[in-house]
Amino acid sequence: MKYLTITYGCQMNLHESEKAAGILEGMGYTPTDAAEDADLIIFNTCCIRDTAEKRAFGNIGALKPLKKQKKDLIIAVMGCMTEQKGYDEIFRKKYPYVDIVLGTNNLDKLESFIRIRREKGRKSYENVSCDNPINDDLPVTRTSYPNAWVNIMYGCNNFCSYCIVPYVRGRERSRNPEDIVSEVRALVESGYKEITLLGQNVNSYGHDLKDKSVDFAYILEEIAGIEGKFRIRFMTSHPKDLNAEVVDVIAKYPNICNNIHLPVQAGSNDVLRKMNRRYTRERYFSLIDMIRSKIPDCGITTDIMVGFPEETEEDFSQTLSLVEKVRFSNAFTFVYSMRKGTKAVEMQQVDFRTKQRRIKELIALQNRITKEISLTYIGGVYEILVEDVSAKHDGCVCGRTDSGRLVTFKGGADLIGQFVKVKITQSRSASLFGELTEQG
Ligand code: 5AD
Ligand code: SF4
């Protein structure tokens, strides 16, 4: 019996697919990359933007002929898309060949739903689950060595006016610090070299726990103190919550990467207010100054959106000027997409052409800055954790600097999982190229 997982969206989803894989392998399934060979196909979906949703529906639809040929094939859909109200009906009516629809917090039901389908031929739909209590007693088949994803919390309380996440992932729920620390310790002991802590808003970690001394700075410090050579990364930080205490902990421990993903979303105070982000452009600048005064070489990355409702030319120029001033080492740029049920849907929308023009301009600006920052790496020697063989360059491997920059250099798969020193010799926009100078 073979399974295939197809994952859309963020790291949270990648990790949840690893949990689904853990359950399936516990049932005796083995992985395959080919849909034709699979007995079970799981789509782990995303709905943050319309494009993510359309792609998932398109690919689920494309399986109809295969299912016709292979009646016993089980198709399951899980993840954020399924959590939206009425989506079980969409699957019932438009995709009747889907056998299982499962919410983001229902993974513990996957095994029984598969058995019901196999033994009784019955379908199961249980999609609205996002406020269920945390269930972390699930096996995990990790697929991202030398990195391991570790959830520290689930959900989001922020209700940014454009965002569907709080509706599909529910309210914030933090894991107990003891459970997190023992998971990380076991991962490091079993050879993982990079731990990435996951939460929609890691800076509010612990706010919902009884012990008020437990917060994000506390858990970071506890994890940094675990013995062994490994790196710690975390995402995502919120500018309204990231504080000096957390930055001090990052500065204090060399094993916490000097890399902060701090989504700004927009540069205009009017837009930030309408987005319900609860910080100003000025507060964002002072945060950046604080980070850089404590950690001068910190790689700061961001998410930025253009075309939020009512965004004027002046608002957009404020975004450009913020990008110019902060000089992010990289930025994920998005065109605003309407999400049903969110506040921003009711506001005056920006037309398609304007959005397209703005995104092009923003990307061009950030590309120029990324390129300029890349040049500053040339000639330097950096410690790289080797992650994988390069997909694009034969005989090469790739890995990241502490600040999060991807570096490609000559080497074999035996280097994966090792910390090596690499001299940077070339840069090409966001990518750096170098030569191995030291191993192990
Ligand atoms: N449209 C476009 N981008 C969005 N994001 C979240 N919601 C939307 C939306 N409705 C972006 C934000 C967030 C990132 C993960 O996705 O920039 O930080
Ligand atoms: Fe969405 Fe805002 Fe929560 Fe991020 S902080 S997940 S953008 S609601």
Image: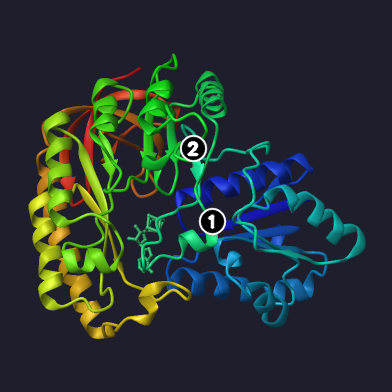
Tell me the SS state at disc 2.
loop
Q: Give the labeled residue for mark 2.
A: 152
Q: Give the labeled residue for mark 1.
A: 170
Q: How many marks?
A: 2
In percent of width and height, residue 85 lies at 60, 72
How crowded is the residue under tag 2: few (<14 C-alpha within 10 Å), some, or many (20+)?
Answer: many
Which residue is drawn at the image coordinates 76% and 58% (left, top)?
39
In percent of width and height, residue 434 lies at 22, 35
- Residue 439's disc is none
Q: Of discs 1 and 2, which sits in the foreground?
A: 1
In the displayed structure, does residue 199 sit left or right of residue 31? left
Q: Is residue 199 above or below residue 324?
A: above
Q: Nearer the viewer, residue 410 or 285?
A: 285
Q: Is residue 323 above or below residue 377?
A: below
How far apart are the alpha carbons under marks 1 and 2?
15 Å
Q: Is residue 37 visible?
A: yes
Tell me the SS state at disc 1.
loop
How crowded is the residue under tag 1: few (<14 C-alpha within 10 Å), some, or many (20+)?
Answer: many
Instruction: Find out whether the residues at labels 1 and 2 contact each other: C-beta distance under 8 Å.
Output: no
